[in-house]
Amino acid sequence: MSKKEWLIKMLIDEMFLIAGHPDVTYEDILGRKDPWYVEYTMTWDQNQQFKKAGIEIMRREMKWSVKRAENEIGWFCLMYGLKLSDYER
């Protein structure tokens, strides 16, 4: 597993944990071709908590700057982010 794949696995596992889906892991969605990310939801606040945790993970594990980690977490959420259940903001 490459460092990038490992990072994606860590972030997906963290996202499910923060979103209140502790029984779902990266291995459960690995290889799925359907839009699995709309099957699970998270709140706006959980999303903000995940972004903060994700940036910390990227800074610690990848040694990225804050700016780079913020940019990358944005792309991650666009590609893999769970559906927001209270998107009325």
Image (spheres, rainbow, N blue to C red):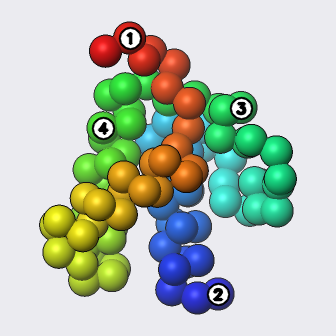
Q: Is residue 72 left or right of residue 37?
A: left
Of pointers 2 and 4, the one earlier in the residue sequence: 2
Q: Quadrant of the rendered structure where residue 1 is?
A: bottom right
- Mark number displayed over residue 48: 4
Task: Indicate the position of residue 23 as horizontal and vertical percent values.
Answer: 68, 44
Single out the residue that lies furthest toward the left: 66
Task: Indicate the position of residue 25 as horizontal and vertical percent values.
Answer: 66, 54
Q: Nearer the viewer, residue 38 or 16?
A: 38
Q: Give me the C-alpha separation between circle 1 and circle 2.
A: 38 Å
Residue 10 sits above or below residue 87 on the image? below
Camera-near label (1 vs 4) is 1
Residue 59 sits above or below residue 21 on the image? below
Task: Indicate the position of residue 8 as horizontal and vertical percent values.
Answer: 54, 67
Of pointers 1 and 2, the one earlier in the residue sequence: 2
Q: Residues within 10 Å of mark 2 (few under 14, many from 20)?
A: few
Three-letter amino acid code at disc 2?
Met
Position of the C terminus, as image quadrant, is top left
Q: Which residue is mark 2?
A: 1
Task: Indicate the position of residue 9 as horizontal and vertical percent values.
Answer: 58, 67
Three-letter amino acid code at disc 4?
Gln
Of pointers 3 and 1, the one earlier in the residue sequence: 3
Kindly identify the residue that appears in the image at 71 percent across and 32 percent down: 39
Mark 3 element type: loop
Of pointers 1 and 4, the one earlier in the residue sequence: 4
Q: Residues within 10 Å of mark 1 (few under 14, many from 20)?
A: few
Q: Give me the C-alpha separation between circle 4 and circle 3.
A: 19 Å
Kindly identify the residue that appears in the image at 51 percent across and 19 percent down: 85
Q: Which residue is mark 3?
A: 39
Q: Which residue is mark 1?
A: 88
Of pointers 4 and 3, the one earlier in the residue sequence: 3
Kindly identify the residue that appears in the image at 25 percent across and 83 percent down: 63
